[in-house]
Image (cartoon, rainbow, N blue to C red):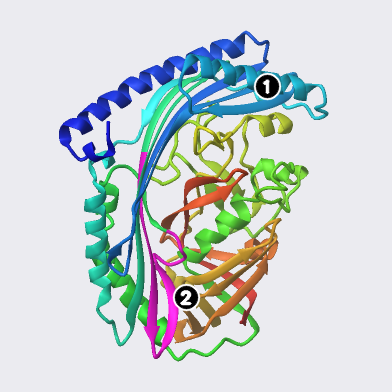
Amino acid sequence: MGANTLSFEGNQNIRIISQIGSFILSQDLVVYALELAAKSQCEYSEARFQRTSDVTCFTRNGSPEPAVIVDAEGIGVRVIYDGALSFGATNLMSRENVKQLVERVVKNAKSASTVTKEKIHFSKEESHVEKWGVEEKKKLEDVSVESMISFLKEIDKSVTAPISDVTFPYRNLFLWHNTEEKFYLNSDGSKLESYVPRASYLGMIVCMYNGKPITISIPPGYSGLGGSGGWEIIEKLHLMEYIPSQLKEMMPGIKASAKPPKDETLDVILGPNVAGLTCHESCGHPGEADRILGREGAQAGESFLKADKLGMQIGSSEAYVSDDPTMPNSMGFYLYDDEGVKARKRRLITAGKFTEFLQNRATASYFKIKSNGSSRAVQFDREPIIRMGNTFIEPGDWTFEEMLRDVKRGIYIKSFMEWNIDDKRLNQRYVGLEAFMIENGKIGEAVKDPVFEITTPKYWGSIDARANDMQYSCGTCGKGDPMHGAPVFFGAPHIRLRNVRVGAR
């Protein structure tokens, strides 16, 4: 079927019928792969068919750039033989190719078992038979590239007019949607079928005021807005109204003839945009058990935590961080992970103590516990590894106004323009975009580029208040080699830290 025929309704129906047929065929091949692995005397085996479809549309200053459309499907197989784990994948969907894949994966495991010193074992888990997914009220496959581009052009028009003498000469706007289908079997008896659609928006805009360019994102922090579901996820964002209103709200900080702050110790209030990133980077990542055990050292980094640090006091009694992939319509939503384990909320930091690491079945076996369902694969040819789902600082019972009134002298860092963190997630640095001094409980003059640089224990140990105004944004979390770009939420309310150092660039 030629590409030029896909715009016709009849041929779209033919394609949908064809996809249903190929999915049934793929299920048969997954069953076949597991049957072959079972005959090879492996102590554990699993097979996963995965189909992903991505559409990304992009306008630059109102003009469309070429859309990026990526479809990928195939089967991944993983086995454990005498403590050696092996993974392989193919996108050649025939019995002969699946047979060759299984034989190769089993052969590699058997070869590795002769030299493997630290044997890999999976934790014993319940088996599950389930079909689950996310409802699309407006199916993403019915949203054409042309309509997405048209939508982006309308958004672009809403931000071209100057606001308070600030112009927006460069505007890069993105719309993305993705569908993810999986069929999974393992030798423990699990059989899982799932379908998750996702959609998101991101905008990068250069503001110009008095000849000075400032790059910002809407929403702030280079993160997106969206979630799991159909096109209704985008419609509910009301972007035509939201983006201009956000730009107007940011103008005081952008226009102010701000001075750099003094280098001093004072109280700091962080906006949800900043705090959400901090919990992802300085709690979620170092709490991944594969990092803690050293597997990711040459790939995505290490962790300041060690295997014996569960229960370690890392912060104050006001430090609470969780990761919950089961949040409805979240970007990181799933109900079962890619090792057949049922997902649940993970309480990473409770009253300042590390109370849970993110675990897969291999690390859970090492820790002699059950997996908490943190294993994810973003493509058929990616091995499932430990990933976050939706990581957030738990809300408290303060209002932002109450938190502000309780500060004699401080700084409010509402959003950030840059950040970095070291390989072990121990030292982190954030540069504020919208930032204001706080004097006697009131927001005062804007300050320019405040630098908030702090160690992870000092950060979590300095929190003394959490507001009740939770906010979430979405992003793509990178990890692994080859790279796994996993869809996630990060979230937080406003939080307050007492007596921390803030300087200037």
Q: Is residue 253 above or below residue 296?
A: below
| Residue 80 tag number | 1
Was residue 397 drawn as part of the magenta stretch in this picture?
no
Q: Is residue 310 shown to the viewer in this render?
A: no
Residue shown at the point (28%, 65%) measured from the top left: 63
- Nearer to us in this view, 468 or 95: 95
Q: Is residue 401 above or below residue 68?
A: below
| Residue 404 tag number | 2
Residue shown at the point (70%, 57%) measured from the top left: 423
Callout 1 secondary element: strand
Q: Where are the magenta residues, as a range?
A: 197-223
Q: Which one is earlier in the sequence, the residue at label 1 or at label 2?
A: 1
Q: Quadrant of residue 363?
A: top right
Which amino acid lies under the numbered mark 1 shown in the image of this protein? Answer: Ile
Q: Quadrant of the C terminus?
A: bottom right
| Residue 92 tag number | none
Q: Is residue 33 shown to the viewer in this render?
A: yes
Residue most toward the top?
Answer: 39
Percent across and percent down for residue 38 are: 60, 11
Residue shown at the point (20%, 40%) measured from the top left: 7
Q: Is residue 179 left or right of residue 366?
A: left
Which amino acid lies under the numbered mark 2 shown in the image of this protein? Answer: Leu
- Judged by its main secondary structure, the magenta piece is strand
Percent across and percent down for residue 372 are: 58, 34
- Nearer to us in this view, 352 or 432: 432
Was residue 212 drawn as part of the magenta stretch in this picture?
yes
